[in-house]
Amino acid sequence: MSLVKRISTVGGFTLLSRVFGLIRDFLMARYLGAGMASDAFFIAFKLPNFFRRLFAEGAFSVAFVPLFSRALGKDITPESQAAAEAFASRVFSWLLPILLALLVLMEAAMVPVMLGLTGGFEGDGASAEKFDLVVELGRYTFPYLVLISIVSFYAGMLNAVGRFAAAAFSPVLLNILMISALLFFHDTDVQAARYLAGAVSLSGVAQLLLLYASVRGAGLKVALPRPRLTDDVRELLRIMAPAAIGAGVMQINLLADVIIAARLLPEGSVSWLFYADRLAQLPLGVIGIAAGTVLLPGISRMLAAGDSDGAQVQQNRALDFSMMLTIPSAAALAIIAGPVIATIFERGAFVAADTQATALALFAYAFGLPAYVVQKTLTPAYFARSDTRTPVIYASISLVVNLVLNLILIRYMAHVGLAAATAIAAWLNVGLLYYGLHKRRHFKVNGQVLMGFAKYSLCSGIMVGGLLWASDHWAYLFASDSALRIGALAALVILGATLYFCALALMGGLKVQQIRTLLSKQG
């Protein structure tokens, strides 16, 4: 299967998940709005997500997948598969008890943890009630961490053998269960938040069952031996240590926005940032995360076989394909942020003022979107070489810059300053990552990719001109909640896509032969 087909497989299922996620967010905006219950849920949901991204999808994945892929070898044989399965079993014997111990500890310590995270919402008129709700919801959502961490373990095994569909589809189950909770239990915003938190952990069970069945279907077996600190487990821990710090830096970066918004900004700021980030995550998940997921095991196996040139070719093609879709997506989100937010969220408890505040945050996030995607295509080149230390250094520098900019920009731009600081720090991190790879001659952007960037940017500029004209002339259609608003947004999306791809085709940036090459096995 070609690189683009693999990215498209992961991206397609991720897109399906994001569509369900938009439906979920639409219902959350309707039944929770941007107030006490929504802020409480988003903070409670942020906690297991923080640890999930820190360990399960962060440090653990970037250490486990290359080692498991190396054990499999470039050409999988029964012997190499047995060796890889034995390694996975030894890892699992440590992973499971550690996760269970963390769950017990966090459930018992939820009050001081949330007090440290929110400060008890000092100065908030309903601070005691809001804090109690955050603690309650945090206890409901945290079991999700244990379940989704095991899901990530199984997903790493499946990705290493070229089976990406089940892991890419599993987040759809999270959104389906959260949608169901919102549809059936929304008498009050607090009730909706409680059932929503319960649905999060229940979805972890559903995802675990799906991935377990997929692993068995792929002919992979995992046992649970007595934990032993073998050489390969020590190597995993050695690689994980700096990766955990690096992932922690990135998550602290995101968590800092929540802490600052909860403590220093008006009520609703956490929710405005959440909704804006959700929309910015749509192209990031479909393109960037898909590319990174596919690249890591592929590059790992190429480097294990000594094919460094092939690994660079893979990265350049992934980068080119990603930017062809990301640059226009970022430009479109920035220009029509208001109509997008109004159409998807503005109804019920989510009012026009919330739309305006969220749209401004989305505008700022959009400028960092290409950086987030490029970062996903650069970091596998480090992780595949078991170098998790260098990205930590670069991420730490970016974190310091982000925190400083947070404290400066919120004075002038409130919550939008937090989004802008995140975008600036992301571009700094990309510059450092590329510098490190280029200096070691591990990766260089070729001329064809640079020419593509120029074409994609110019064509995006043509698209932006058309969207500005259309959104100005159709502004009255977004002023009321009706089917016309949905139709107008659909028309804007179609217009933007048509202008971009037609301009790209006329400039020779999109040829039939190029598409065939990308989709071919050699591509």
Image (tube, rainbow, N blue to C red):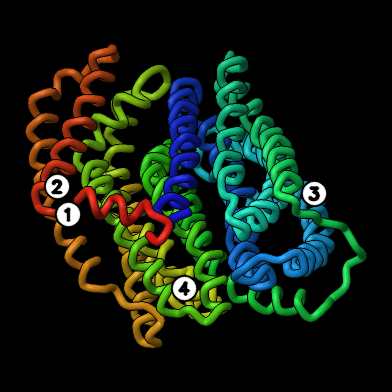
Q: Which mark is residue 25?
A: none
Q: CA distance from mark 2 to mark 4?
A: 31 Å
Select label 2 or label 3 by which is in front: 2
Query: Which residue position is annotated with label 1?
Result: 509
Does residue 371 appear to the left or right of 286 in the view shown?
left
Q: Are the two marked residues, 3 and 1, in contact with CB atoms closer than 8 angstroms?
A: no
Q: Residues within 10 Å of mark 2 (few under 14, many from 20)?
A: few
Element class at badge 2: helix
Q: Are marks 2 and 1 in contact (CB under 8 Å)?
A: yes
Question: What is the spatial separation of the Cα atoms under label 4 and label 1, in whole angstroms?
Answer: 27 Å
Reading the chain from its start, which is encountered first: label 4 or label 3? 3
Which of the numbered marks, if any, corresponds to residue 108?
3
- Disc 3 marks which amino acid? Ala
**Disc 2 to disc 3: CB gap under 8 Å:** no
Label 2 or label 4, whichever lies nearer to me, is 2
Measuring from the top left, give residue 137's x and y in whole percent.
Answer: 66, 36
Residue 49 in sight: yes
The residue wearing badge 2 is 505
Mark before the other along the chain sequence, 3 or 1: 3
Residue 237, located in which quarter of the rendered image? bottom right
